[in-house]
Image (cartoon, rainbow, N blue to C red):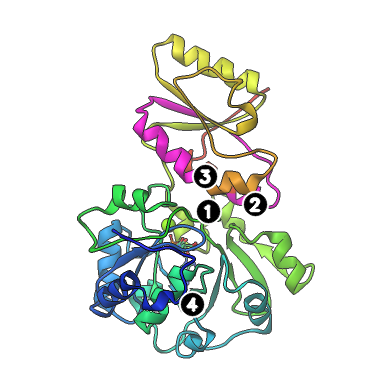
Amino acid sequence: RWTVDNFEENLIKHPHVIQASLWIKQNEVVALPTETVYGLAGNAQSDHAIARIFEAKGRPSDNPLIVHISDRKQLKGLVSSIPLNAQKLMDAFWPGPLTIVLPKGKDVSEKVTAGLSTVAVRMPNHAIALAVIEASGVPLAAPSANLSGKPSPTTANHVYEDLKGKIPGIVDGGSTGVGVESTVVECTDETVTILRPGGVTFEDLEHVVGTGNVMIDPGIQNEKLAPRSPGMKYTHYAPDAPFVLVDGSPDFLQQLVDKERAAGKKIGILTTDERVDFYRADCVIPAGRRENPETVAQHLYEALRSFNEASVDQIFGEVFPKTGVGVAIMNRLEKSAGGNIIKEQ
Ligand code: TXA
Ligand code: MG
């Protein structure tokens, strides 16, 4: 594990950044921090490196990867065209937590795009990630650095838990900021379609490309439709114990918990700072502050992972309003719960 201070100057000359880039030049893979979650990065131009990424994560090969760049010059060869609205989104949100799916260029391996005619690209807003890309001299393909199906890693420790012995190194830049993965939008023409909600919200996007120009892939919400982003169809972010969301009052949630505990089960509750003292259970974990959903996004995966250490038999979680970043939070929670939700009558 190579610790690097994100605020250090001249990161591109940092010995650990150089170490990471040397592995990447040898077509090995390394984990590194971004502003969203840790990524497992490899040379996007090397089929060997791409194969190593899929192998280390245990990821299905029909799920394409995001290509990370540090400079827009790297788009040459990577994409074949950039619609005006895509350009506007880059101007507004790069570097930042927005991934843009564009028509794929001639230099992109089929292994990265899982055979699709499009490629997903983003420029992360993280000094260490940018320095490693620059030092490596190539765009980096990087999925989240978790085992496939587990919550994404927001600390180097999470990466270590999942990938120890499987990769040569982790660049440790501390906790990530946003906490949920980037928003993925398709922008192959002037319509912007959200394929995965994230830190950049529907409202943020509409503000830049204009009202009426942002759509939401109906496959995200509707179980019966195939999502346009292959990754959205998999079970995800799941803690070890069964997890169910409760759409109701804290009293209602507590009654559900009491019933299970009376039957001898060890119960966890995923809540917020505002309600943490209200509940009685074996393990009560606040993700962040309900009044500030950004803090919930930031600590959501860490909270989900901590139920594994507590070895609970069942987890009950609160729901959040689906506005702003709440859309991304609820998308992850619903996946994590496998769609299990109990509604108070
Ligand atoms: O914040 C993030 O985006 C993080 C950090 C490391 O950058 N990365 C990340 O990658 O979340 P991953 O592989 O866990 O998720 C990528 C998502 C998947 O749902 C995948 O199906 C989708 O992007 N995707 C990739 N290429 C695509 C394409 N050409 N068309 C549609 N969806 C695509
Ligand atoms: Mg992932």
Is the C-beta separation of discs 1 and 4 under 8 Å? no
Q: Does the magenta stretch include residue 131?
A: no
Residue designated by label 1: 180
Ligand 1 near label 3 (Cβ, under 8 Å)? Answer: no
Ligand 1 near label 4 (Cβ, under 8 Å)? Answer: yes
Judging depth in this view, the residue of 97 and 256 nearest the camera is 97
Query: Image height check: is 157 above or below 272?
Result: below
Q: Residue at x 68, y 46 (%)?
A: 322
For residue 299, the mark is 3
**221 horizontally vs 304: left or right:** right
Residue designated by label 4: 118
| Mark 3–mark 4 distance (CA, rounded to whole Å) | 32 Å
| Mark 4–mark 2 distance (CA, rounded to whole Å) | 26 Å
Q: Crowding near pointer 3: few (<14 within 10 Å), some, many (20+)?
A: many
Tell me the SS state at disc 4.
strand
Residue designated by label 2: 325
| Mark 1–mark 2 distance (CA, rounded to whole Å) | 9 Å
Tell me the SS state at disc 3.
helix
Of the two numbered discs 3 and 4 in the rendering, the one whose residue sits closer to the viewer = 3
